[in-house]
Image: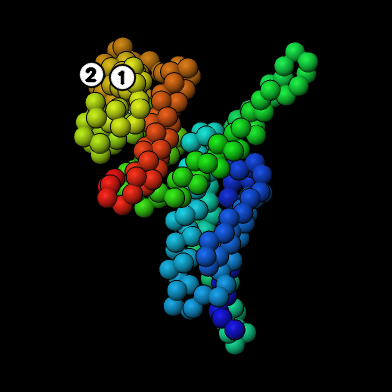
């Protein structure tokens, strides 16, 4: 029989995805839910198992980073345990080391019309949006700009004292990739007002979480929740616009480059 590998991880918060799901690739299936991840590889030659194990870890991290955009919620992925069953029936178990990130919360609501019928289920919409962002992040995880954008957003969540600085990195990375501010706005469908507003909050407003605090000593104040929410919303819109941009290039054919 072929060698078989099962890779298991845990994550917190256990309701990060709110409901279980699974996805399949050619050589493995991954089940995610309730704080546990199980990836099962089968029919894979021994020399390919290690590379597939690394690939799935990269894929999972991309999915978590993408999902993180929806509810602004950091996560913790544990180290992983691998169970290798060899063709002769012997079993080998390996364990890796974990990394840690901070956690936060969220709220839910269901919108009803005058007759009491459901018009909008925020939880369901959030779950579906999270799945979509996770899928896109995984799909384009090898694009270096995508990696940079997601890491900057993650840093904004985990390094709150510099949140606006990290969110601005998203705008800056897109401008550098797409030929400057005006070309980036045009390619991504971002208005000048949105582009400028993030720049103002990160660079000009006298905010403690901003980029030029040293120039505004004596004037600094903490950003309000509304200002931080506005900056996050713009940054997430920019990331989604870049995903859409990559989709459009992929649809246009191989002669186009990213």
Residue drawn 34% across and 45% down? 252
Residue 15: quarter of image:
top right
**Element marked by disc 2:** helix
**What numbered label is drawn on residue 103?**
none
Query: Farthest right residue?
Result: 115
Foreground pick, 87 / 151: 87
Residue 35 visible at all: yes
Residue 103 visible at all: no
Please determine whether, in this image, residue 94 is positioned above or below residue 25.
below
Residue 248: quarter of image:
top left
Please provide percent x and percent y for residue 171. 31, 31
Residue drawn 41% across and 25% down? 234
Foreground pick, 62 / 249: 249
Residue 47: quarter of image:
bottom left
Q: Which residue is mark 2?
A: 215
Please determine whether, in this image, residue 101 is positioned above or below residue 116.
below
Q: Which residue is mark 1?
A: 192
For marks 1 and 2, the one nearer the N-term is 1
Please provide percent x and percent y for residue 122. 63, 28
Foreground pick, 136 / 51: 136
Mark 1 in CB contact with mark 2 (< 8 angstroms):
no
Residue drawn 58% across and 50% down? 11
Residue drawn 46% across and 67% down? 52
Query: Farthest left residue?
Result: 179
């Amino acid at each position: 029989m072929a060698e078989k590998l099962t890779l298991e991880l845990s994550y917190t918060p256990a309701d990060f995805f709110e409901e279980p799901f699974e996805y399949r690739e050619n050589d493995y299936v991954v089940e995610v839910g309730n704080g546990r991840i199980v990836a099962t590889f089968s029919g894979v030659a021994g020399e390919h198992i290690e590379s597939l194990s690394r690939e799935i870890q990269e894929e999972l991290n991309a999915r978590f980073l993408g999902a993180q955009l929806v509810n602004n919620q950091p996560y913790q992925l544990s180290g992983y345990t691998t169970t290798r069953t060899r063709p002769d029936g012997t079993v080998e178990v390996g364990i890796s080391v974990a990394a840690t990130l901070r956690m936060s919360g969220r709220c839910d609501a269901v919108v009803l019309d005058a007759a009491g019928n459901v018009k909008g289920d925020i939880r369901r919409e959030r779950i579906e949006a999270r799945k979509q962002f996770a899928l896109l992040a995984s799909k384009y995880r090898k694009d270096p700009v995508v990696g940079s954008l997601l890491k900057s957003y993650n840093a904004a969540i985990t390094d709150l004292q510099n949140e606006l600085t990290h969110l601005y990195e998203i705008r800056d990375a897109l401008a550098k990739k797409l030929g400057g501010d005006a070309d980036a706005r045009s390619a991504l469908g971002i208005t000048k007002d949105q582009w400028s507003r993030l720049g103002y909050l990160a660079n000009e407003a006298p905010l403690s979480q901003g980029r030029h605090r040293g120039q505004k000593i004596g004037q600094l104040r903490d950003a309000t929740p509304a200002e931080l929410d506005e900056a996050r919303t713009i940054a997430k819109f920019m990331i989604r616009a870049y995903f859409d941009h990559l989709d459009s290039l992929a649809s246009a054919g191989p002669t186009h480059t990213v």
